[in-house]
């Protein structure tokens, strides 16, 4: 069904066209899928996130996006401006909210968003991350289907970062936010089970998806291992664990390719090639034998693992690498939290072509069964209807 007469407001704090992390890749893919269904899409982001990642916000794909707003907390500093003084005075009499990203919700921020929203008639509004829910609670949402993409189980994710977190209070806030929406999207089986237990059939699981990238021919493999990651704390901790604990058990001639801002946080090694930014990962994945995912923390499905599977590349990871997979074996992944076993598995795959081919075929089949773009578009279609 074509939804060309329908309009969606898509809120994602970062620039989804920046290709810099798994969560961004997911947002970009969802935009592509919504566009393929014929929707008119307006995109809203947050200035501090754009600037924090060195993104001017100028680049958005006009073939996907019809209108674009980047929200700022304060008007431009101009002492001759009525707007500047208006919001400066309002700030003096406004108490800052602390929970649910309250830091951002200045009157100017909220007024700018509300004015943008009120200019058009929307059929759908999609918020990425439940903690931005306060953006829309006071809007007129008559005849608007509200959707939230959770991306993660936020309470558990926050607990990993802060073990003194009041879990009951935080999870209650998370559930309250999610209950506000007509549809709640999860990306992993575990989170789907948890949220569905509380919120029922409004919860729909849409796993990450990628095009089928596996080769029919053969490219020369110049890297034994590849790791793709942003510089979020979980990636930094995990890859440094790999360097400190696993690499001593690997022969020095094992060639490793690392791609992403994670490169800025790891030490130089002769057998590690660092690529801080790659416009396309395709050539690097095709030149690599095995993807690694030595994650120690973080929740939810690991998008980097699904991406590797889309290239038909076996994955060696920690137990966390297969979080969110309903099928824990026969999925193209071999896992262990023991450093020596991790290294041994990698070397077995490198040295045993029969085992390697078995894992490769499992990776391709598991990807085809669960993570194709066609399946994702079908699920979006069911939500929009």
Image (cartoon, rainbow, N blue to C red):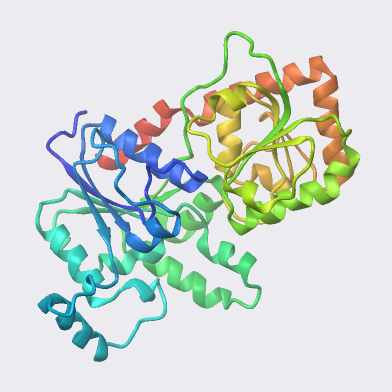
Q: Which one is nearer the viewer's eye here, 70 or 151?
A: 70
Q: Quadrant of the N terminus?
A: top left
| Residue 258 against residue 150 in the figure, above or below | above
Q: Nearer the viewer, residue 364 or 31?
A: 31
What residue is at 14 percent from the left and 76 percent from the top? 83
Q: What residue do we see at 81% from left, 32% from top?
A: 346
Residue 159: % across, % down: 61, 68
Image side of residue 206 versus residue 148, left or right:
right
Image position, residue 145 (x, y; %): 23, 52
Quadrant of image for the C terminus: top left
For the residue pair 148 and 261, the one nearer the viewer reads as 261
User: Which residue corresponds to the image point at 55% horizontal and 27% vertical from the top-left?
Assistant: 310
* Residue at the extreme top of the image, as rendered: 217
Residue 34 in which image quadrant: top left
Q: How many marks?
A: 0
The single residue placed furthest to the bottom in the displayed view is 93
Whether 360 is drawn above or below 133: the answer is above
Q: Give percent across and percent down for residue 123.
A: 17, 48
Q: Is residue 99 visible?
A: yes
Q: Quadrant of residue 165?
A: bottom right
Q: Is residue 139 visible?
A: no
């Amino acid at each position: 069904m074509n939804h060309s007469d329908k309009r969606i407001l898509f809120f994602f704090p970062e620039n989804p066209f920046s290709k810099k992390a798994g969560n961004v890749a997911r947002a970009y893919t969802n935009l592509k899928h919504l566009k393929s269904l014929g929707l008119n899409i307006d995109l809203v982001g947050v200035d501090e996130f754009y600037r924090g990642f060195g993104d001017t916000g100028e680049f958005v794909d006009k073939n996907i996006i019809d209108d674009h707003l980047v929200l700022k907390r304060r008007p431009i500093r101009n002492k001759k401006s009525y707007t500047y003084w208006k919001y400066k005075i309002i700030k003096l009499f406004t108490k800052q909210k602390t929970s649910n990203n309250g830091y951002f919700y200045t009157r100017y921020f909220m007024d700018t968003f509300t004015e943008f929203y009120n200019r058009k008639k929307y059929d759908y509004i999609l918020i990425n991350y439940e903690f931005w829910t306060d953006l829309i609670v006071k809007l007129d949402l008559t005849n608007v289907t509200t959707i939230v993409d959770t991306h993660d189980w936020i309470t558990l994710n926050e607990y990993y970062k802060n073990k003194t977190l009041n879990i009951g209070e935080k999870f209650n806030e998370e559930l309250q936010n999610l209950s506000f929406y007509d549809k709640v999207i999860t990306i992993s089986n575990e989170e789907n089970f948890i949220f569905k237990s509380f919120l029922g059939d409004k919860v729909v699981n849409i796993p990450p998806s990628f095009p089928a990238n596996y080769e029919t021919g053969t490219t020369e493999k110049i890297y034994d291992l590849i790791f793709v990651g942003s510089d979020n704390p979980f990636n930094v901790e995990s890859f440094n664990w790999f360097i400190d604990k696993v690499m001593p058990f690997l022969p020095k001639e094992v060639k490793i390719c690392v791609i992403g801002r994670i490169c800025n946080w790891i030490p130089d090694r002769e057998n590690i090639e660092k690529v801080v930014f790659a416009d396309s990962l395709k050539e690097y994945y095709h030149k690599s034998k095995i993807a690694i995912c030595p994650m120690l923390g973080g929740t939810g499905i690991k998008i980097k693992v699904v991406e590797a599977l889309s290239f038909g590349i076996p994955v060696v990871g920690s137990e966390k690498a297969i979080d969110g997979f309903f099928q824990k074996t026969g999925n193209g992944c071999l896992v262990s939290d023991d450093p020596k076993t991790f290294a041994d598995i990698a070397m077995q795959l490198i040295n045993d072509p029969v085992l390697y081919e078995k894992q490769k075929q499992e990776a391709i089949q598991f990807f085809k069964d669960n993570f194709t773009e066609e399946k994702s578009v079908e699920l979006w279609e069911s939500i929009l209807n």
